[in-house]
Image: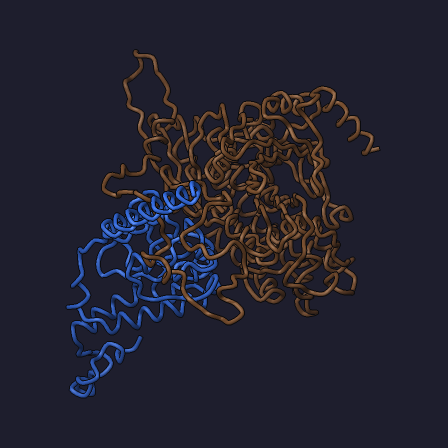
Amino acid sequence: MSTDDLNSPEYKDKIPEELQGTVAITTLDRIYNWGRRNSLWPMMFGLACCAIEMICTAAARFDFARFGMEVMRSSPRQADVMIVAGTVTKKMLPQVVRLYNQMADPKYVVAMGACASGGGPFKEGYNVVSGIDKYLPVDVYIPGCPPTPQALIYGLMKLQQKVDKQSIKEVYREAGKEIPIPVLGPDIMDPRDYDKIREYTLKKAEAEAQAATAAESAQSA
Amino acid sequence: MSEQVVATEQDLLLSRFPEVVKPDERKGYDGYIVDSKALLDFAKTLRDDLGYDYLSSVTGVDYLPEGKMEVVYHAYKTTGGAPLVFKVQVPREKPVVPSLVSIYPGADFQEREAWDLLGIKFEGHPNLKRILMWEGFHGHPLRKDWHEPYYEEEHKPYKSRWPEGKAFRAEDRNPFGKNVDYPAGFDPAKWTPDISDALIYEGLGRIEKPHDDLPTEQIIVNLGPQHPSTHGVFRMVVTLDGETIVDLEPVMGYLHRNHEKIGERNTWLMNMPFTDRLDYLSPMSNNFGYALAVEKLLGVKPPERAEYIRVIMAELTRIQNHIFAIGMFLNDMGAFFTPSLYAIEERELILDVFEAVAGSRMMVNYFRFGGVARDIPEDVMQKIHDLAFERLPRRIDELDRYLTNSEIVRARGEGVGVLTAEQAIAYSTAGPVLRASGVPYDVRRAEPYGIYDRFDFDVAVRYHGDVYDRYLIRMDEVRQSIRIIQQALKQIPEGPIMTGKPQYQHRVPPGESYGRVEGPKGELGFYVVSNGKGNPWRYHVRAPSFINLTALAEMAKGHKVADIVVILGSIDIVLGEVDR
C-alpha cells in the first residue's frame, strides 16, 4: 500500500517534497472507501457446492486474507458482504432475505456461481429460485459451476473496485430500507405481488370452470 | 450353490404367503410383489426368519399409464450378499401402504419423503409430515402429472429450443417472471402461514419430572438453517432441559434442488453431471454408482483399464472426503480452521489430479456408461503415484500424530453420541457410522462391484460406536484406500477406456436396476426404471447422508447441547445429498 492510493491526484503536487510519502492529502470519500475496500468482511454463509470452493478460497493455497477478507463473520450484523454461495431454494429464501435485512449498511451481495446468478443447472426445479437477483440487489455476478477460487477472488476484487467508486452520500441513501420477507404459501409468495397473484388465480379458476362446462356440453352433445 | 439358496428362499416365501406374495414377472424386473395387507407379516418374516435385517432403500414409483403407485423396498443381510427386492402396488387414486417403521425404523425418513414427493400415505407412521418441502405446498411434485412452473415438455432435449436454436428464457413465459405457480382460486390474503414449525414443536417429546425436583422449564432451541456448524443449510430443533437434550428433530429440505424430478426429464447421460452435485465433496463416487445402475440395464462392461481408473478415482475421492471431514470435525470441536488447513492442503493436491483428468476441480462429470471420459495422462499418473506412495501416507501419519491422542479430541469424543450395533442396523445407517458401531459391512466386500474383488484390503471396523470411533474409522479407511490405490497403480494395464463408441443418446432396455457403491458417506444407491425411451421413467437416489440422519436423535438424546455439533460433525453429512 503506497500513499499514492490514498492521495487525491489533484492535490498530490501541493504536498511539499520533503513530506511526500509521509503526508497525504485526500478526500473523505477516498479515505473512507480505502478503509472499507480493504476490510470487506464476508458473512459465513454457505448454501451448497459453491460454499466448498469458498472454504478453499479461505484456506492456505488461495487465501483471500491477502485482500482483507479473511474475517468471516457468522453473524449478519458484523458482515459487509453476503456471498450467496450456492442454490437458493424457495424453502431457504425467507431466511436469506431476513439475513440480508439484518446486515448493517453499507452492504453488498455477491452471487457466486450459476445457481445464485440465474438458477444454474437446477433452474427448472420446483423448489429453486432462479437467481437471487429476483429478490435481492446483486452487486457482482461470478459465473462458474462452481467458480474456481481464482474466479471468486476476481469477483471480490471487482467488488473492491465498485467500493472505490462510491461516494459516502450514496452509500447510506438506502440505509435501513428492508426488503419484504417472502412467505411460504402453496408456492413462494412475494408480499408485493399479492394483488397480481389474486388476479392470476381468479383467471385460472375461471378458465378451469369454462373448460369444465365445455367438456360437459361436448359430452352431452 | 447360491442359486439353490435363493430357490429355497423363494419357496419358503411363496409357500408361507400363498396368493398374497407373487414373484415380479414383468420383463426386466426382479423380486416380489406383496399385497399391502400382508406387507407387515412379510417384512417380519424377512427380518426374523431369513436374516434380511437391513432395509436399505424405500421409494415410490408413479406408474401413471397403469394407474398404479408402487413402493419399492430393498433389503439386505448385514452378512453380505445380493438384495431382496419387494414391492407393493396400490391404486393411484388412493395410495395407502402400511408403514414399516415399526419393523425397520430406518424407513422413517424415506417413507416421509415418499409421502412428500409422491403422496403415498403410510398408515401407522408415527410422524407422517412433509420432509423436503414445507407443509402447505401445492401437490406432490414427483407425480408424473404434476408440472413445475417452468414446465416446457415431458422430456429433454426440448424441441422448442432445438434444432432452430430459438432461445428464450423460461421467465419470459411465466406471468410473474419468476419460478412460481399458484393453484386456481387461491387467495393470498386468506392464507394461514406455514404451519411446519408449529407441527415440529408440537411433535417434540418432553419429559415429566417429579415435583420435588427444582422446577425448570424446558425450552426449544433452533440450530440452523443458517448456523456455522451445521455443514450447510441444515436445521435441528432441540428441546433442552437446562443444557441436556431431551429430544431433537432434524429439519431439512433447505437445499432440495429437485434432483429426481429434473433427472426424469433429462436423458440418461445428462444425469451424469447432476450426480456430481449430490454429494459435492465426492463426485467421482456418485458418478460410479449411477454408471453402475445404468450399465446393469444396458448390459455393458467397461474395459480393464477403465475399471482400474474408476477404482483409483473412487478411492482418491474417499481420501479427500475423509480428510476434509476430519478437518471439519475438528472445526466443530472448536479447533477452528487450523486442522482444516492441513486437511485442505492435501485435498487440493487430489483436486489437481481431478482437474487434470476431468477438467474440473469439483464437478468432474468423468464417468460414462461403459468406461470413463478421458484417459489419465502419463504425468498425472506419476502424480497419483507420488501421492499414493510418498506424500499421503506420511501426511496421514502426521494428522494421526497431531490429533488422535489429543486430550481434547478424546475428552469430547469418547462415549459421546453412542450408537449400538443393533441400533445402527435398525436405523439403516451406512458407511463409517455403521462400521464404527461394530458392523463390518462394506459394499465393496459385501457385494463387490467393479473390480473390488481383486484387491487386498481390510474392512475397517471399530466397536464403541461413539464420536471418537467415527473419527478413527475415517483414519483407518484412508489408509485402506491408499493400499487399494497402490495395488491398482501396480496392476493397471494399457488399453482402451471405453466399450464401444461414445454416445449421447443411449437406448436403455425397459426394466429396473439398482446400482450401489460404497461411497465415502456410506452406501450410495441409484434406483432407475426405464420404459425403453430416451429418459429414465424413475430416477431415485438412496442417499447415505439423508438416511444416516435418522439415527441423529437417538445419538443426541441425553447429551449436552454443545455435543450435538460434534455428533453431527461425526456423521459427516453433505446437504446436497441429504436434500437432493
Tell whether B390 sits left or right of A25.
right
Say which of B236 and A73 sits in front.
Answer: B236
Tell whether B473 sits left or right of B184.
right
Number of marks in picture? 0
Say which of B193 and B172 sits in front.
Answer: B172
Let me know if residue B469 appears in the view.
Answer: no
Let me know if residue A14 appears in the view.
Answer: yes
| Residue B283 placement (x, y as % from top left) | 57, 54
Q: Residue at x 31, y 56 (%)?
A: B176
Furthest residue in direction right, as rendered = B1
Viewport quadrant of the N terminus of chain B: top right
| Residue B522 placement (x, y as % from top left) | 60, 42
Residue B427 lies in quadrant: top right
Figure colour of chain A: blue
Say which of B500 and B452 sits in front.
Answer: B500
In the displayed structure, would residue B464 be above or below residue A199?
above
In the displayed structure, would residue B428 be above or below residue B519?
above
Tell whether B135 sits left or right of A11.
right
Figure colour of chain B: brown
Q: Residue at x 19, y 78 (%)?
A: A23
In the displayed structure, would residue B295 be above or below residue A137?
above
The structure's colour scheme is by chain
| Residue A118 placement (x, y as % from top left) | 40, 61
Say which of B262 and A93 sits in front.
Answer: B262
